[in-house]
Amino acid sequence: MTAIEQLRTTFSRGVTRSMDWRYSQLEGIERFLTEQTDVLSAALKADLGKSSAEAWTTEIGFTLKDVQYTRKHLRKWLKPRKVSTPLVARPGRSKITLEPLGVVLIFGAWNYPLQLSLSPLIAALAAGNCALLKPSEVSPATSKVLADVLPGYLDSNAVEVLEGDADVATELLKQRFDHIFYTGGSTVGKIVMRAAAEHLTPVTLELGGKSPVLVSRYCDIKTTARRIAWGKWLNAGQTCIAPDYVLVDASVKEQLVAELLNAIQSFYGDEPQRSKDYGRIVNDRHFNRLLGLLDEHDVINHKDYDRRERFMAPMLVDDPPAHSALMQEEIFGPLLPICAVDNLDRAIAKIQHASKPLACYAFTRDKSEQQRIEQHISCGTLCFNDTLVFMLNPELPFGGVGNSGMGRYHGEYGVHTFSHQKPVMTRRFILDVALRYPPFNKQKLSWLKKLM
């Protein structure tokens, strides 16, 4: 019996539907995160150069809060929701229940290889599904821990962790699943969607894009710079919602650049390569890609990198041309273009002209500017006067729109993603009014029009 057949057999037996089973899986993930903290930290250090503090705040601790929040609220989320019943269907009652989809496939991502594997898994198991998790092979140390250690904390008949490269992923996509959850780039996202169409399998695609930052003259420039710097150079810029480029009012550009340089020095010192809090590029291929994006551009500070360590310092790029690869492709690294704009309308127009981003950040105290941005910019999430922090609110859904993805998760939204919202109506046998049955006449039709 293959792994997928085993998962489907387990689901058909109804094992995963009970609340006890769901809670036991969530408790297993919680124990995995707490008991294997040191092992996971070491793996994240090996894959991405993450410090223990960054590994905890963005991966281990973040995911731990996710599973604890889910455990706390799951029973409430799963309660059937009563809805009204029309007069013509009374006496009766109507409700909407959440039922698990079945066997789901989850593709993890390499940039946050723990969080982006386990957060969707938490939602899938909380919803009562069996799951096959494929971690990213680009972060091999974390993938190995997930494959070797995580199954010991979960029901091995209901959860499978399978390592492998693109060939393994291709074979998995040929199989029938009840839902596919993919986190990554749009190129592979299209491949996933095409493969899913063969089985009419629903998909959640958490993609990316070029998340812009708008900086108005009506803001606290120093605080703005610190918050942009934190969001951009966390994980060495390898974050799907990292600030990708800055559109700043020309009148405050020089001030913003100066404060960004101050923030970099404050966070990482005069030599970021020596900082214990600054990460590394995941592999040589991505390192070379980033070097290619730098070609023929003016770096405001200086080009500083070390191929042996896959170290690439925070760099500010001055007004790159709109047609350049740096401004057309998602950067996914520590390069930050700084582009001057004459006014807010020009900035909004530039963003509208591009594909819809996963996140958009805007720094302004002006309420009318905030209103215009909210009304005219379509994006996965809009955040005023900070970066990334919306991820800390489990009450907010996370997901993209247009090219940045489809579907959403986190908290209750994740449970809904991995569930079918099944309508249920229950009628009573009394009062079986003949009004709806043939033969019809004008009087019957008149009454039906009033009651329906």
Image (cartoon, rainbow, N blue to C red):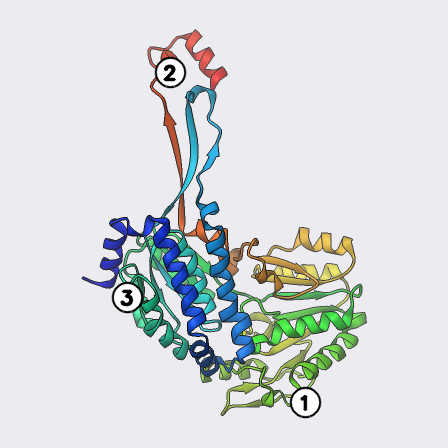
Residue that badge 2 annotates: 436
The numbered mark, 1 or 2, whose residue comes first in the sequence reads: 1
Foreground tag (1 vs 2): 1
How far apart, in angstroms, are the residues tagged by discs 1 and 2?
81 Å
Which of the image's four quarters has the N terminus? Answer: bottom left
345 and 155: which is toward the camera: 155
Q: Secondary structure at mark 1?
A: loop
The amino acid at mark 2 is Arg
**With 310 as the anchor, is 178 left or right in this view?**
left
**Residue 346 place in picture, x, y as percent:** 72, 62
Relative to residue 150, is residue 384 drawn left or right?
Answer: right
Q: Nearer the viewer, residue 255 or 318?
A: 255
From the viewer's perspective, is residue 331 above or below residue 19? below
Which residue, given by chain and number where applicable, does mark 3 sit on?
171
Q: Mark 3 or 1 closer to N-term?
A: 3
Residue type pointed to by label 1: Asp
Residue on which disc 1 sits: 270
Residue 17 locus on image (x, y percent)? 33, 48
Instruction: Specify few, some or many for label 1: CA neighbours under 10 Å numbering under 14, 14-19, or 20 or more.
Output: few
Q: Nearer the viewer, mark 3 or mark 1?
A: 1
Residue drawn where x is 39% and y is 55% of the image: 23
User: Residue shown at 45%/73% (left/top)?
Assistant: 110
Q: Is residue 421 above or below residue 417?
A: above
Q: Is residue 80 visible?
A: yes
Disc 3/disc 2 C-alpha distance (Å): 52 Å
266 or 228: nearer the eye? 266
As shown in the figure, which amino acid type bears the numbered disc 3?
Glu
Residue at image point 50% right, 15% down: 450
Q: How packed is label 2: few (under 14 Cα within 10 Å), some, or many (20 or more)?
A: few
Residue contact at pointers 3 and 2, CB within 8 angstroms: no
